[in-house]
Amino acid sequence: MVIFVARHLFQPIDPGTPRPLRFEFDGAEITARRNDTVLAAVLASRERCGVNEFDGGGRAGFCLMGSCQECTMWDEDGRRLRGCMTEAREGLRLRSRPHCGSD
Amino acid sequence: MQTDTRIAIVGAGPAGLAAARTLVEAGLRPVVLEESPLAGGQGTRRLSPLTALHRSALFGASAQSITRREDAEDAVLKQCDFRTGTLAWACHDNRLELLGPDGFDSLTYTHLVIAVGATDRLMPMPGWTLPGVFTLGGAQVALKRHASFIGQKVVFAGSSPLLYLAAAQYLRLGHRDLTVLDTTPASGKARAFPAMLRHEPHTALQGVSLIAELWRGGVTLRAGVRLDRIEGDSRVQRLRYATARGRDMTAEADAVALGHGLRAETQLAELAGATFAFDPAFRQWFPRTDDRGRAGERLWLAGDSARIGGAEAADAAGSLAAQSLLESLGRAADAHCIRRDTRRLRKQHGFQRAMTDAFRWPAKQAATLADDVLVCRCERVTAGEIRAALATPSGPIEVNRVKSITRCGMGRCQGRFCGPALGEMVASATGDPPGRLRTQAPIRPIPLVFDAGPMAPEGDDT
Amino acid sequence: MSPALQSDVLVIGGGLFGAFTGLFLARAGLKVTLLEKGQIGAQASATNFGNLRLHGRSARQYPLSIRAQELWESYGSLTGEDCEIDRTGHLYFAGGERGEIQLRKDVETATRFGVESQLLEGALLRERFGFLSDRIRLAAFSPRSAVANPRLSTPPVARAMARAGGTVIEGCEIANFDASSGGFAVTSTDGRHFEAPKLVNAAGAWSGALAKQAGEPVPMFSAGPPQFVTEPLPHRLHPSVHMVEGDVIVRQIPRGNIIFSGYPRTHSLPSGAFTHVPPAKTLRGMRELVQCIPMLARAEVIRVWSGVEGYLPDMLPVIGPSTTTPGLFHAFGGSGGGFQIAPAVGQCLAAVVQGEVSPVDISSYGIDRFTERSEVSEKIHLEFDQ
Ligand SMILES: Cc1cc2nc3c(=O)[nH]c(=O)nc-3n(C[C@H](O)[C@H](O)[C@H](O)COP(=O)(O)OP(=O)(O)OC[C@H]3O[C@@H](n4cnc5c(N)ncnc54)[C@H](O)[C@@H]3O)c2cc1C
Ligand SMILES: Cc1cc2nc3c(=O)[nH]c(=O)nc-3n(C[C@H](O)[C@H](O)[C@H](O)COP(=O)(O)OP(=O)(O)OC[C@H]3O[C@@H](n4cnc5c(N)ncnc54)[C@H](O)[C@@H]3O)c2cc1C
Ligand code: FES
């Protein structure tokens, strides 16, 4: 039996809601609904939002309420943010790995 | 009114909001600090505008009363110094340290009410770090805040009344592939039910009708299961479990919501000087308070962060804490309110205590975790490493020292999700009750340099 | 009353001072019992910053420090275990003019004792340690300095001691001792009894009480520096870095977390149980760190901590025999630098306890050196809350 597994995790509660916002995540374009969170937008088209720094295992957020820090990502200036606590905005450029210390 | 009174309330969930309401009614203007962008709290979380479209489907007959309550809360908050997006990250010397939209700040208080709620309590299991596994509370927040289902085939697993509530909310929003795997056997629930009914008949019966709703909606419901393993290549693909009769089963799934009840968020209270006592029914450490929530000369604690009790208990506790605070200011106490809230609180706590039987924390499972199961998600520490440390001569025999040696609990979440299981592992090795990981600031990670950058608030964007 | 446990030597305090003393005594064939009120190596020896810094030490301390570094370098063979010792080198830099004067003096002193400490300025400094802010003009690098993981450092020493025939007893707080001609009778707060002809007081910041009982009180106080650790980040900061003035002491562990310590130190609670980390100090440390190493600006702090350490007026430990009570020996008061010297403290004291000549002269660490007129280190004024 072949089981279909979607290449993303989240399902928008209304699949038809327009996704007019665009931002960048690890170089790829992500679309988002108005009032979306960054994490919801990323997980609507991907299976993970980063990897654990020690064993490379995928991470995709866990608590979804700001507590576990597993949705950690960085903006283009290196600021850390939690995807689950950040509203999606047009033009954001985010990445799943830090660049702290690389300048 | 004393002019030099400065009351701070941390957390705008039911407990903090009730405290604010009581103080505002008494003519005071507390500062209310809330980390998230909106008031509301956890279970009572305000809906994302995207989810609000489904308000009546989600809340059914209660939709109107919830709207009324939220309006009343907003009216109270208008009379407070209400600061959203503001994290209280430390407390020392009667001063709160804050990180808000404009950066670091601090607030010296004369009176402090801490009402920061709870988060999910988890028992690790093989595969629980795979993408697609979320906390049970998180699955609910996914709906309310992220306007998303966590997957297409969702399993709600663990031991908590929220398993049923969350599944019902998914069902009401049109999700049609749901399974509930409850690890507490039906017999445990049957035993607990009379006590639940006695303390809170209404809520107990609501639970029954919730199960009927799930049944009618075609949700697969199983109690008394043993959760074996979550599997998948790079994400959740299935969950293996055994039924109450011992039959091995596989639930195909692309998402799992895992939860074993709630764990009080006690960190800030500890920094503010609270002391702790172990509660054997809940098998967790709660801060010590008097029966109105007073925990120190200037300190009151209310809601789930003081003792797991649910939204109604949080409301009663917040109100009582504020009454006690007013008394400490020399105001006449409102004997009627105190009697009423004390009664409400006692009922709710009795109910919750009875529920610890209906939804059991699987404490003993910690000792049986296979060696390769990750206990600490952040630092990737396995059960085997923890056991090896415990077995070493002159090795650690107390949770904080186990953490120090193994790194379990040292990561970004600071032991919030591994702490309970770590405590049980140490307890099973030593025979003592589970210990408590000590808190140090910050409550959440804070940047060396604050710089809002492109995340600066844009103003009104709804 | 249960019979007293008999030993050749009782060591009170299972920190690094006590554990190393116990190890060297056990190796010499003595029956040693190590008595620890809590768990082995869970106090200052576990919570410290982890610097095994070889330069910038007080001139008096170099011989002991050099001996200690040799022992740390053979920690693996001494204990049969590892505590993440890493020869990262140590970079001192001057934050201002006072620091520059200090630094030049320190390099001179180190060189005099044969410890390599390379003075770096201008282009050379930029080229080698470009992460330092441009406003820093002078630094000194000690290639032989190292770091270790303090949390892991003491238990292997205690286990090695046990393998050599010693006994470790945890959860045993010593309330008092009785000295008689035959030796010492020691009683724990829960009523256990221990006897031995020799007694070592290595109770860290809590040693003052036992010294006082012996009739030789010491002007020791307890404090600890505020410290913090960040989330793990890519590993970019290789040496251990340290502002001479002490405002910024920082290193990055191989897992990626950045560890910070910085003065002024905070006094411990009067009970001696704990040292708070006032948030204002954390914020100050965060700012100072970024001013010195701008590339770390985006790092996030996940936890603060400190520890309870005993400090003496000249910022040097007490190591040696009691002057009032034959058979009693002291090793305490690390004064902020005890982690590095600990193995040598243990080796020297073990020799003295056996009546042998100490491999390094420790006569200047005597407990009777404190008088009204004795010198107070300027660090006491500069590096603590006043
Ligand atoms: C995940 C979850 C789901 C739940 N679902 C339901 C449900 O569906 N139905 C139901 O009846 N009950 C539910 N409950 C229980 C119910 O929500 C709680 O009992 C109730 O909300 C407790 O109220 P509280 O005021 O104590 O805390 P909370 O409601 O948790 O409020 C605490 C508030 O404090 C804020 N906060 C926390 N830390 C800080 C800080 N350091 N600085 C600033 N602000 C801070 C949080 O953002 C939050 O808004 C749920 C609980 C949880 C944890
Ligand atoms: C935050 C901090 C950072 C530091 N950084 C460095 C550094 O980078 N480099 C460096 O070289 N040094 C550093 N130090 C100093 C160094 O940690 C100490 O000097 C050293 O660990 C002292 O070891 P000790 O064995 O004397 O004390 P401890 O490790 O404190 O051991 C004393 C032991 O005695 C036990 N005890 C006390 N009373 C009794 C009793 N009555 N009965 C039984 N047992 C008792 C205690 O429980 C404790 O385990 C730092 C110290 C602190 C606090
Ligand atoms: S998912 Fe846990 S903090 Fe964002």
Image (cartoon, helix red, strand yellow):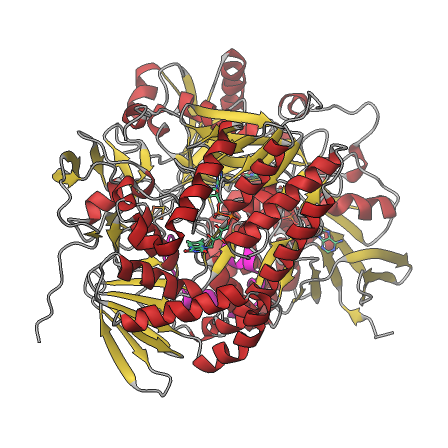
Is B177 drawn above or below residue A63 in the view shown? below
Front residue (pair B115, C261): B115
Q: Report if residue A43 lies within the magenta region.
A: no
Seen at 35% across and 16% down, the residue is C134
- Quadrant into which the C terminus of chain A falls: top left
Left or right of A12? Residue C161 is right
* Residue sitting nearer the eye, C58 or B459: B459
What is the x, y in percent for residue B292?
68, 48
Q: Nearer the viewer, residue B277 or C326?
A: B277
> For the view shown, which residue lies furthest in the left direction?
A2
Q: Which residue: 44% across, 42% down? A: B68
Stretch of the chain drawn in magenta = B377-404
**The N terminus of chain A - image quarter:** bottom left
Q: Is residue B190 above or below residue B156?
A: below
Instruction: Give the quarter of the image for residue B329.
Output: top right
Q: Residue at x 61, y 49 (%)?
A: B317
x%, y% of residue B242?
Answer: 33, 81
- Residue B220: x, y in percent? 28, 74
Q: Residue extending furthest top? A: C97
In percent of width and height, residue B305 lies at: 55, 50
Q: Is residue B34 visible?
A: no
**In front of the other: C266 or B195:** B195
Is B394 magenta? The answer is yes
Residue B120 located left or right of residue C27: left
The part of the image, by quadrant, that contains residue B428 is: bottom right
